[in-house]
Amino acid sequence: WEGFFNQTGNANYNQEFEGDLISNLPLAAAMGNHDSSAAGVGGMASHYLWDSDVAGVPVCYAFDYGAARMIILNLENAYSRDNVAARVAQLQFLTKEVKEAKSKGKWTIVGYHKALYSGANHMDDADVIFNRGYWAPKFAELDVDVVLQGHDHVFSRGFITKTGYK
C-alpha cells in the first residue's frame, strides 16, 4: 500500500503523467484477502477513510460514475461465507442499488476481490465455491451488467446463466 500511495508517475506506464497517482486517477477499491484481518486496519482501511454503506461490513459502498452505478461488495470470508447477517445485509444493499440504478437507465457494475470464476488456482477454494453458489445466481437474478474481480492475476471473460453456469 505504501508503494502504491506514494507512487509518482512511472515512465513504464505513462510518460506524460507526473502527479500523485492516488490524487489524480479515479479508483474504486475492494477489500481483499490481505486487507481483511482487523477489518482492514493496517491495510486498505488505514488509507481509505470512508463510511461503509452496510453496517458492520467495511469497504462496501456504491457511487455513480457517468452512465454506471459502481457497487463494491466485501466478499471476504468474515463478511460473506462466515457471517450470514453480513451476507444478507450486502444482498439487501446490492438489490436496492441495482434496482435504483436500473430505474435510472444506468449500467450496473459490481466489484469485489476474489473471483467466483477463474482459470487460475483459486477456483476450487472453499470460499470461492461457497460464494459462487450464493452470489452468481443473485447477480443473474438482478440482471447485473458487469462483474469485476481480481485476486488471481489472470484475465477471464464469460457470460453466466441464472444457475451459475456458462
Image (tube, rainbow, N blue to C red):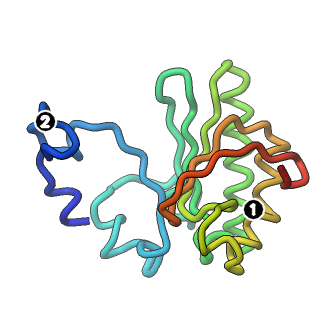
Q: Is residue 114 above or below residue 34?
A: above
Neighbour tally class for label 2: few under 14, some 14-19, many 20 plus, Cα within 10 Å:
few
Q: Secondary structure at mark 2?
A: loop
Q: Position of residue 75 (x, y in %)?
A: 61, 65
Relative placement, left or right, of 76 versus 30 is right
Q: Residue at x 9, y 38 (%)?
A: 18
Hey, which quadrant is residue 119 in on the image?
bottom right
Could you give the CA–CA distance between mark 2 and mark 1, rounded to whole angstroms?
Answer: 45 Å
Q: Is residue 126 above or below residue 142?
A: below
Neighbour tally class for label 1: few under 14, some 14-19, many 20 plus, Cα within 10 Å:
few
Q: Residue at x 57, y 32 (%)?
A: 69
Residue 44 badge: none
Q: Residue at x 65, y 62 (%)?
A: 118
Q: Position of residue 89 (x, y in %)?
A: 70, 59
Quarter holding the N terminus is bottom left
Q: Position of residue 88 (x, y in %)?
A: 75, 62
Q: Are marks 2 and 1 in contact (CB under 8 Å)?
A: no
Residue 88 badge: 1
Q: Nearer the viewer, mark 2 or mark 1?
A: 2
Given the image, on which type of amino acid does mark 2 rest? Gln
Relative placement, left or right, of 6 versus 13 is left
Hey, which quadrant is residue 57 in on the image?
bottom right
Q: Position of residue 79 (x, y in %)?
A: 62, 70
Foreground: 34 or 56?
Answer: 34
Q: Residue at x 52, y 48 (%)?
A: 61
Residue furthest left in the image: 18
Given the image, on which type of amino acid does mark 1 rest? Val
Q: Secondary structure at mark 1?
A: helix
- The residue at which mark 2 appears reads as 15
Q: Is residue 56 above or below residue 102?
A: below
Answer with mark 2 or mark 1, whichever residue precedes in sequence.
Answer: 2
Foreground: 89 or 161?
Answer: 161
